[in-house]
Image (cartoon, rainbow, N blue to C red):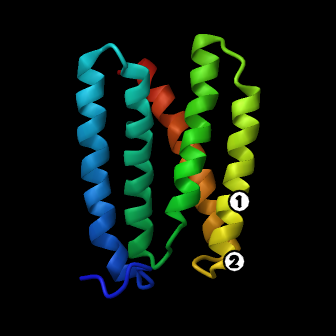
Amino acid sequence: MITSYHMVSIEERKFPTLLFISISFIIWNWLYKSTMVDLLSLLFLGYGIAFIISYILLYFKIKISLHTGAIGGLIGFLIYFSYHYKINLILFLALFFVLGGLIASSRLRLKAHTPTEVFVGFVIGIGTQLIAYQLYYII
């Protein structure tokens, strides 16, 4: 199914994406039912939504950078975590934005993605975390 660990073709990315969707939702469900770390469970819900969007985009022959999506998701989680608990996490956010820039530039330097793929991955990562936080109040 996969010819190299770079997963250059879009077809090679489909099975691992489905696997990560399953893992994300299993962990989300497990953490959410524990009720002690329900806010942490939203991190995995957001990642699961991001993987679903990524999988749908694969059918339109569009791939995104899952690396920048992951760091974007972590930044989105820290944003609503600090908002929810009224904690100042500006230094951590600044550190993760710098780390996100390093990750994005490494993906570009390795020619693994185009600038658009990197940007879309980052936006989807942050956006799905904020959607997950909004769903938290609906559920």
Amino acid type shown at disc 1: Leu
For the point 54% across and 44% down, the residue is 73
Task: Please tell me which of labels 1 and 2 falls first in the chain.
Answer: 1
For the point 62% across and 52% down, the residue is 123
Q: Which residue is mark 2?
A: 109
For the point 37% across and 19% down, the residue is 37
| Residue 119 in view, yes or no | no
Judge by depth and name the residue closer to the eye, 113 or 132.
113
**Above or below: residue 53 compared with residue 116:** above
Residue 99: horizontal and vertical position, in percent? 68, 51
Mark number, residue 102 = 1
**Residue 21 vs residue 88: left or right?**
left
The residue tagged with tag 2: helix, strand or loop?
Answer: helix
| Residue 21 in view, yes or no | yes
Number of disc labels: 2
Amino acid type shown at disc 2: Arg
